């Protein structure tokens, strides 16, 4: 096992990794920007180094500075968390070149899965159904319109190098596609340094299901069951749960088998997540693979009793995955709600000073948070400031516990999305398990309760 690692991240995920490292006796090195001088992870780590100015290009995306800090601190490995450099193949390669272990899969796998077109081809070759669409980049508006006509509207216009909601546009006809093409391509070029676009059939009214995987360097791959991440706003996840209420029996086994088989064929290592869409006819389609720890990993930890960060570290250190599939049980139910510093009406970021913070404390409530009373939420970074996770013996019990937790969660001084979270968790259709990726648009945005 490692003796010291650098955590190339900030906020709640940096605090989360530090917690596991402390338990395992691993020393931690935090990095921080000028804006994060007083952040929680800086004080919790054994050592801390300044990266640079507040903008991410001068701090958390400065891979060379991170590597130089790791070498100066005599660290053996770098944990990238999620976001920032976690899925940048060139950074993983530089770590290898400098004799540092990148806690994640190989640079080759990161690059393959980061190219959404190449990922579609690889998954199709591995036997995982892919959403109907183009297998090559569409070069211009005309080519896109012709391809969409063949696929059938509506379609999703997507950035080949993108992820999440950035670089993604739903279009329902040729006029919309022509209007969206250049703007979406330019946005993709700006955010991902790659303007290649492709098309997929827009599958509406689907569930967003993902399978958590662990894989060691000896080819042993296991799954830790599925999560339902269907509650989204503008393609960004808001509430996640494990297991998925509607994914049972043969369908659960089918998705897990597809994911494990694909990971083995890819030669995947470390923790990873295969995301897919499940339509109303129970057809399963590959969406993307995240080659890192997921924001929503705590719900899987709650139902399996496993520490995913610990297994990331053990695998990266060369240990064999001693867990056997038949030994892993999914017990109870867990929910996670992401708390964002944003205006609940406009959904614009709401940076500022937190003047009051009250977090409910119960044995079944878990907080992943790196802010406190007096913390300043910076406008430079993602507005997610905390996550609240609850567990219960059943889905209904977990929902009731989340209702209680959200009622008592208070943040003052900034605006947050707590009102939205409360509306979702209290909605009768959510309690019934009738959730799709359109849930918020259909049931919340129209004022329904």
Image (cartoon, grey):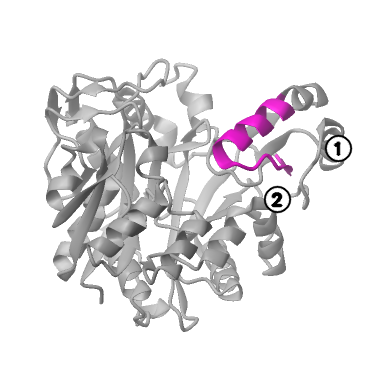
**Residue 132 vertical placement versus 318 (above, below):** above
| Residue 47 rendering spot, x and y as whole percentages | 16, 55
The answer, for residue 374, to whether it is visible in the render is yes
| Residue 132 rendering spot, x and y as whole percentages | 75, 49
- Front residue (pair 444, 87): 87
Q: Residues within 10 Å of mark 2 (few under 14, many from 20)?
A: some
- Front residue (pair 24, 296): 24
Quadrant housing the C terminus = top left
Could you give the CA–CA distance between mark 2 and mark 1, rounded to whole angstroms? 19 Å
Element type where label 2 sits in the image: loop
Residue 316 painted magenta: no
**Which residue sits at x=33%, y=38%?**
338
| Residue 93 rendering spot, x and y as whole percentages | 49, 64
**Residue 315 vertical placement versus 108 (above, below):** below
Element type where label 1 sits in the image: helix
Q: Quadrant of residue 375?
A: top left
| Residue at the spot of label 2 | 131
What's drawn in magenta, residue-wise? 180-201
Count of all numbered marks drawn on residues in the image = 2
**Which residue sits at x=18%, y=49%?**
364
| Residue 237 rendering spot, x and y as whole percentages | 44, 39
**Which residue sits at x=78%, y=25%?**
178
Q: Residues within 10 Å of mark 1 (few under 14, many from 20)?
A: few
| Residue at the spot of label 1 | 143
Q: Is residue 277 left or right of 390 when viewed as pictured?
A: right
**Which residue sits at x=78%, y=50%?**
136
Are the residues tagged 2 and 1 within 8 Å (C-beta)? no
Quadrant housing the N terminus = bottom left
């Amino acid at each position: 096992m490692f003796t010291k690692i650098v955590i190339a991240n900030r906020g709640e995920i940096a605090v989360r990794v530090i917690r596991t490292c402390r338990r395992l006796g691993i020393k931690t090195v935090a990095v921080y920007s000028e804006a994060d001088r007083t952040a929680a992870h800086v004080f919790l780590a054994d050592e801390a180094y300044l990266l640079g100015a507040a903008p991410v290009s001068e701090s958390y995306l400065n891979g060379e500075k991170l590597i130089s800090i790791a070498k100066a601190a005599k660290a053996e490995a770098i944990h990238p968390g999620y976001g920032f450099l976690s899925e940048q193949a060139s950074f993983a390669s530089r770590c290898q070149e400098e004799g540092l272990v990148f806690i994640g899969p190989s640079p080759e796998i990161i690059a393959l899965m980061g190219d959404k077109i190449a990922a579609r081809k690889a998954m199709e070759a591995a036997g995982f159904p892919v959403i109907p669409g183009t297998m090559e980049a569409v070069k211009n508006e005309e080519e896109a319109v012709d391809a969409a006509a063949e696929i059938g509207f509506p379609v999703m216009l997507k950035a080949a190098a993108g992820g999440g909601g950035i670089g993604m546009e739903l279009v329902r006809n040729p006029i919309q596609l022509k209007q969206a093409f250049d703007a979406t391509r330019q946005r993709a070029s700006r955010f991902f340094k790659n303007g290649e676009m492709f098309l997929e059939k827009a599958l509406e009214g689907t569930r967003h299901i993902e399978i958590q995987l662990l894989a060691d360097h000896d080819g042993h791959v296991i799954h830790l069951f599925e999560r339902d991440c269907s509650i989204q706003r503008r393609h960004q996840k808001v509430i996640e749960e494990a297991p998925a209420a509607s994914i049972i029996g043969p369908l659960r086994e089918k998705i897990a088998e597809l994911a494990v088989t694909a990971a083995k064929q890819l030669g995947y290592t470390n923790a990873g997540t295969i995301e897919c869409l499940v339509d109303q006819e129970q057809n399963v389609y590959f969406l993307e693979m995240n080659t890192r720890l997921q924001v929503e990993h705590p719900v899987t930890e709650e139902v399996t009793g496993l520490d995913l960060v610990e297994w990331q570290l053990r695998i990266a250190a060369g240990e064999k995955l001693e867990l056997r599939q038949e030994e892993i049980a999914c017990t109870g139910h867990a929910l996670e709600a992401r708390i964002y510093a944003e205006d609940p009406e406009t959904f614009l970021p709401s940076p500022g000073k937190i003047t009051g913070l009250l977090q409910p404390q119960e044995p079944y409530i878990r907080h992943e948070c790196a802010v406190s009373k007096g913390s300043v939420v910076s406008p430079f970074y993602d507005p997610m400031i905390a996550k609240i996770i609850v567990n219960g013996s059943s889905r209904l019990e977990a929902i009731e516990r989340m209702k209680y937790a959200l009622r008592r969660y208070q943040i003052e001084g900034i605006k947050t999305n707590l009102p939205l979270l409360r509306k979702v968790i209290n909605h009768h259709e959510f309690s019934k398990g009738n959730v799709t990726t359109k849930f918020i648009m259909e049931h919340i945005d129209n004022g329904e309760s």
